[in-house]
Image (cartoon, rainbow, N blue to C red):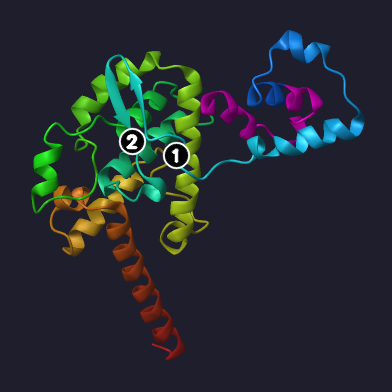
Amino acid sequence: MVANLIPFCRLPKPDVNDVIYEMAVQIVFSIPAKRWAAWTMSVAEWHMLKDQVKWVFIVPEKRPFLNFEHQGLTYILPEENFADTTALELSMAFIAYTDFADPDEPDTSALNRLIAILCRPIRKDLEAFKKSDDWTGDDREPFNEARMMKRSERLATLDMSFKVVILTYFETQSKLFLVQYESLFGGDSTPRYADGRGWIMLLKNIAKEGHFGNFDEVGRQYAHLVYASALDDTINAEEIRDNQDNNGE
């Protein structure tokens, strides 16, 4: 049902009319079209019914489902707020999303890449991994670009309704994530890389600081750990500049 309902929350408010509400009611309550056509109700009853389905027009912030199956593989969705997502895979996801959402030349295949980056099968060595000192809590196999590209081709045949659900989930979590690091990502200046490569350049610059090691080591760290550290460095640098300005240096 989630896949059938998610498009409603993506509708612009001016487009939500009684016809749309009728569609939502039929889906939520599993009412066949012929049965719905035979129904009669008062205005008050209709308003009460509409109130019961208003929630479908609100963009959900929770993970819509834990996993989904496609062509014999079970794909696991990332946790909310990218809690189990590494810095590298999140950067790659933002690049794929930028390609997909490009207003001038949108790359529709980038949506398949986005899903393949975020949603991955369970690790084959999961039980051993859980017992090791490297256990991170993430059941998905580690991100691998070559495997991602192959899986993105398979995911081209995934039902569009599932793609929209995952896309909406990513967009919602992205907004929440970026709000947390607004001081790091905010600003009105024009980005140096309009195609999303700035995410990779940011990781490169963080690697230069040496807190987490080289570029590969930075990429394997959880995104929140990396960006929280970068945010702290940014705030410290701003405080130093402010103190210098106040002291006339």
In the rendered image of this protein, does residue 198 appear above or below residue 20?
Answer: below
Of the pair 29 and 120, the residue shown nearer to us: 29
Look at the numbered discs 2 and 1 and tell me whether their residues touch, using CB distance below 8 Å.
yes
Q: How many labels does the image show?
A: 2
Q: Which amino acid does label 1 sit on?
A: Phe
229 drawn magenta? no
Of the pair 147 and 122, the residue shown nearer to us: 122
Mark 2 or 1 closer to N-term?
2
Quarter placement of the C terminus: bottom left
In the rendered image of this protein, does residue 190 appear above or below residue 212?
Answer: above
Residue 85 placement (x, y as % from top left)? 30, 46
Residue at 53 percent of width and 56 percent of height: 188
Residue 170 placement (x, y as % from top left)? 44, 39
Q: Residues within 10 Å of mark 2 (few under 14, many from 20)?
A: many
18 drawn magenta? yes
Residue 238, labelled with which disc? none
The residue beneath circle 2 is 118
Instruction: Label 1, secondary structure: give it.
Output: helix
Instruction: Label 2, secondary structure: give it.
Output: helix
Q: Can residue 129 be seen in this view?
A: yes
Residue 196 placement (x, y as % from top left)? 38, 41
Location of residue 90 by image quarter: top left
Residue at 49 percent of width and 40 percent of height: 171
> Magenta stretch: dominant SS?
helix
Residue farthest to the top? 34
Quarter placement of the N terminus: top right
The residue beneath circle 1 is 170
Of the pair 25 and 195, the residue shown nearer to us: 25
Residue at 33 percent of width and 47 percent of height: 199
Stretch of the chain drawn in magenta? 1-22
